[in-house]
Amino acid sequence: MLQINVLRQNKEFVKERLAAKYFSDISLVDTILSSDEQVRKLKVESEAIQATINATSKDIGMLMGKGEKEKAEEKRNEVTSLKTTAQQLTDQLSIAEKQLQDDLVKLPNLPHSSVPKGRTPEENEVVREAGVKPTLPADAAPHWELIKKYDLVDFETGAKITGSGFPLYKGKGAKLQRALIQYFLDYNTAAGYTEYLPPLMVNEASAFATGQLPDKEGQMYHATADNFYLIPTAEVPVTNIYRDEIVKESALPIKMTAYTPCFRREAGSFGSDVRGLNRVHQFDKVEIIQIVQPEKSYDTLEQMVQHVEKLLQSLQLPYRILRLCGGDMSFASALTFDFEVYSAAQQKWLEVSSVSNFENFQSNRMKTRFKENNGKTQLVHTLNGSSLALPRIVAALLENNQTENGINLPEVLHDYFGSGTI
């Protein structure tokens, strides 16, 4: 959530940055500032009346002490009238504050100055591309055929158990999932990230704190009886560990990693874009999260990008890194880098990770601060990244490494999987 002071002091700058993100209701900034002015006016009036009530109440005591009961009674009547007015102001203030809050949370985070202009994914900026795209024979199979050939994932039974988009991993398919998850977690913890295993459902406050609500309620599965949401990413529960907390500056940076299943209702597109593992409603992902001082967050973002890049290099997958344009960024992000791996059989790039800096957008919602050495407190910056999302990694590993005799796995997975081939 944007801080109201930012809007007060930099109205035109805020509008310009929102336009860079193609936010459709720029006039909402003026509405918010008008509401903010009304709230502040009501607060001044309310405080003035309360001060009068307090002063008049003291006068009543003094008059009673002097035996001037009639004048004291007049003052009591004044206080009664003032209290009625004060209650009316309190009610108006409550309504005005709620309206201000409801409007303020509709504003997305402001994009960083380095975010390229553009509205669509095609306008994202390619930062760099690395790795060797394999040359496959003409009869190379896409991963959805390889999955059937080697009996790794059963989509039909998954659909019977739950519905379309809920794969059932089996045999070596399940073992490959477990191997990747363990390798990703070991890679992250070796870099100083503390591992967590969080709840897979969160309450409304947690979903609001990281920016999923009110922006993405339609994309999350909602357990209405308890008002819980199935998590779309481990970012939500793990970042919320520090909601309503003040941490010591010496405790920063806080580095966390977690494996969770992720649940997303998004329908996606049609055709090959959603075939096999390209787009599913439940998938496994390992996440990294950092909480840092504001002045260190962009250095941290670069470190996290390098961390994910080296992980992809270890898997020997061709990849590219994209800096997302304003129109393709998430609601809460200030700057995002996407990682895509090349799927040789599909001859297309598949997104496998997003690494983002949210600056203080999430921490303002979470009320997560740190205490400086001088005793002052300020909001932290939060960052997160996929390290990594499994479905499209598996798709690329299967397709790019297929041979006549099976699937050759990268060396880093041999011990985890217990074999070098499927």
Image (cartoon, rainbow, N blue to C red):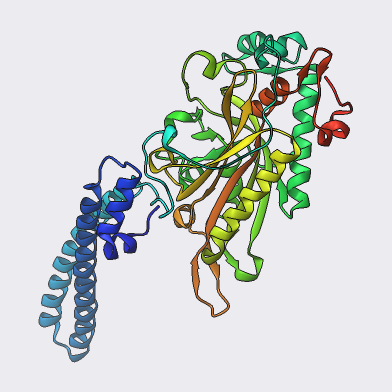
- Work out whether 72 lies above or below 90: below
Percent position of residue 67, x then y: 17, 88
Q: Quadrant of residue 417?
A: top right
Percent position of residue 418, x then y: 89, 28
Task: For residue 245, say whether it is visible.
Answer: no
Residue toward you, 95 or 333: 333
Residue toward you, 335 or 344: 344
Question: What residue do we see at 61% from left, 16% from top?
Answer: 276
Q: Count the marks: how many?
A: 0
Percent position of residue 360, x then y: 47, 57
- Work out whether 86 lies above or below 188: below
Task: For residue 402, say whether it is visible.
Answer: yes
Residue toward you, 374 or 294: 294
Residue toward you, 8 or 115: 115
- Work out whether 290 lies above or below 405: below
Q: Is residue 194 left or right of residue 350?
A: right
Q: Is residue 303 left or right of residue 407?
A: left
Percent position of residue 251, x then y: 65, 66
Question: Which image quarter holds the C terminus?
Answer: top right
Single out the residue that lies furthest toward the bottom: 66
